[in-house]
Amino acid sequence: MIQFENVSKIYQHNDSELRAVDQVDLTVHKGEIFGVIGFSGAGKSTLIRLVNLLEKPSEGRVLINGEDLAKLTKPDLRKVRKRIGMIFQHFNLLESKTVHHNVAFPLSLSGTPKKDMNQRVKEILEFVGLSDKAKQYPEELSGGQKQRVGIARALATSPDILLCDEATSALDPETTKSILRLLRKVRDEYGITILMITHEMNVVREVCDRIAVMESGQVIEKGSIFDLFSKPQHPTTKNFVRTVMENDIPASILNGIDERDSSRNIYRFTFVDESAGQPVLSQIAKKFDVEVNVLFGQITELQGVPFGHLVVELQGEDPEILRVINHIQQKVAVQEVTSHAG
Amino acid sequence: MQVNLMEFWPRIWEATYQTLLMVGISLFAATLIGLPLGIILVVTRHGGLLENKPFFNGFSTVVNFFRSIPFIILLVAILPFTRLIVGSSIGTAAAVVPLVIFSAPYIARLVESSLLEVKPGVIEAAESMGATPWQIVRRVYIPEALSSIILNLTIATIGLVGASAMAGFVGGGGLGDLAISYGYQRFETDIMIATVLLLVFIVQITQTVGNFASKKIRRQ
């Protein structure tokens, strides 16, 4: 478990000070995959380095399983660090060593006997699917394979926590997916707590249980993936959601609405959970004397739960349309679309 | 002409031997001193593993001080020190002492630049694994930079070949001395050509071997 208690990291530069991390309160539970998302410069890189004390907090405390690393002696800190694996955007492998020796490296630091070490390396390379690459050098591997070596190296000492510093940002979308699947497997099979930072919304959507959104060093919003995607509050969160979910009605459709008379009845239906599985529209068409015209929409899946929205035009008499709305509001969230606001 | 040159073959061989001896011993000793100095420069600098600004600034200045003295001045200036170390201020052994003092700070700077080529992220990764500073130096910095260090030592070796030509001032002998005292001062052009060709040959071989070793180590 990782707890940030009112943590700040302040860099003094001559007269000015930069608050890279600003009064962050955050708890990452055991066995959870927690994502921190933010644009570059938001402070997430600093935040993740506070966990294994690569950066020292200026204020507040970071507790790892209840222990404040800042209070430890250097030898004790090094011991705790062996229980916290870390992977990086640019992999940071030893170019002069083979895959086998890269993975063995953290074990050899603590003087693990050669036989145990070889056994463990073999085991973990099998887990990440690189058994056949043990004798190759990092230079000979693809980006995805290098990150697998990074993951194997981070897991070699059987840590409780895995820190992922933009681990997929240098990879193409396909490779990103396979690495994320592997990270999920790491959590599911070893029960390791994973804290990842990223600027890619599709990454957190794919794999995280909960996320926090960071901006200017502060956590501006946090919650389950589902809550943040379905009800984003902060403008930055909305921006991030927009990168993977098109919420705005395309201009071509909006223009069409404006050009004709403004008295058209256009609504946005937001489907959440089981309502997405119901044939809401066909029920309306059957039960009421209205025509249903779908203008735009998107349904996707978050954490195994269907989620999405439809922009629909209802054609018919006004009282009848009101009845439709009253009826359907019990099942889905309804919002009237009046102008550009969408 | 031909006969004249033949008379000097033994002299040339002796000079070659002296040059190789001076360069070899100096290189070995200077690396032994320069390598740790280079490591100290890297770990104590700003952002280094054992950052220590006052120490780094002082140490860096001392290194620069020794690097700025022209070799021919250094050769004479440290004569008492040389006598203290090797018991004599003339001869091949006496030439080695200033050569070492001349090239050790140079090698320190070359090692420093090689070590700085190691990506900071790799060092950070080792730190995150709980490696001690000494483990990072021995098992990350040096192996990762070794290929580059060897290339830089090749440069230092060639510098030593050049500097050793001045060893004649303290009776150190060597090819450079032969070229000056016979080729230049006695107008024996043949000797001049032969020694220069030999020096070119030594430099070429050194560079080739250095390149090969560096490449070999990079690809293990």
Image: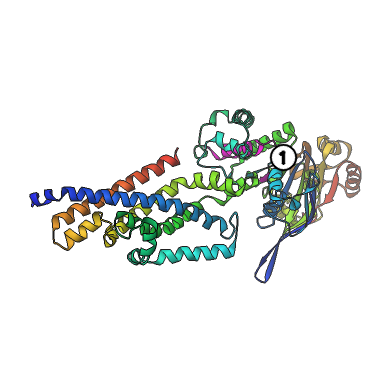
Q: Position of residue A31 (x, y in %)?
A: 77, 38
Residue stretch in magenta: A141-164
Q: Position of residue B40 (x, y in %)?
A: 53, 56
The answer to whether residue A113 is above or below residue B78 is above
Q: Could you say where residue A177 lies in the image, as x and y percent from the top left?
A: 64, 38
Q: Amino acid at mark 1?
A: Val
> What is the secondary structure assignment of the residue under circle 1?
helix
* Vertical comparison of A19 with B135: above or below: below
Q: Nearer the viewer, residue A125 or A318?
A: A125
Q: Is residue B35 magenta?
A: no
Give the residue drawn at x 91%, y 45%: A326
Report which residue position mark 1 lands on: A207
The subunit carrying tag 1 is A
Q: Residues within 10 Å of mark 1 (few under 14, many from 20)?
A: many
**Residue nearest the viewer, comparing A238 with A129:** A129
* Residue at the image position 60 percent from the left and 61 percent from the top: B52
Q: Is residue A161 left or right of residue B163?
A: right
Q: Is residue B56 above or below residue A142?
A: below
Quarter of the image with the C terminus of chain A in it: bottom right
Whether residue A306 is visible to the viewer of this picture, yes or no, is yes
- The residue furthest bottom is A15
Q: Residue at x 36, y 56 (%)?
A: B86
Quick one: quadrant of the N terminus of chain A?
top right
| Residue A312 seen in the current view | no
Decide whether residue A143 is among the magenta residues: yes
Along the viewing direction, whichever of B158 and A325 lies nearer the viewer: B158
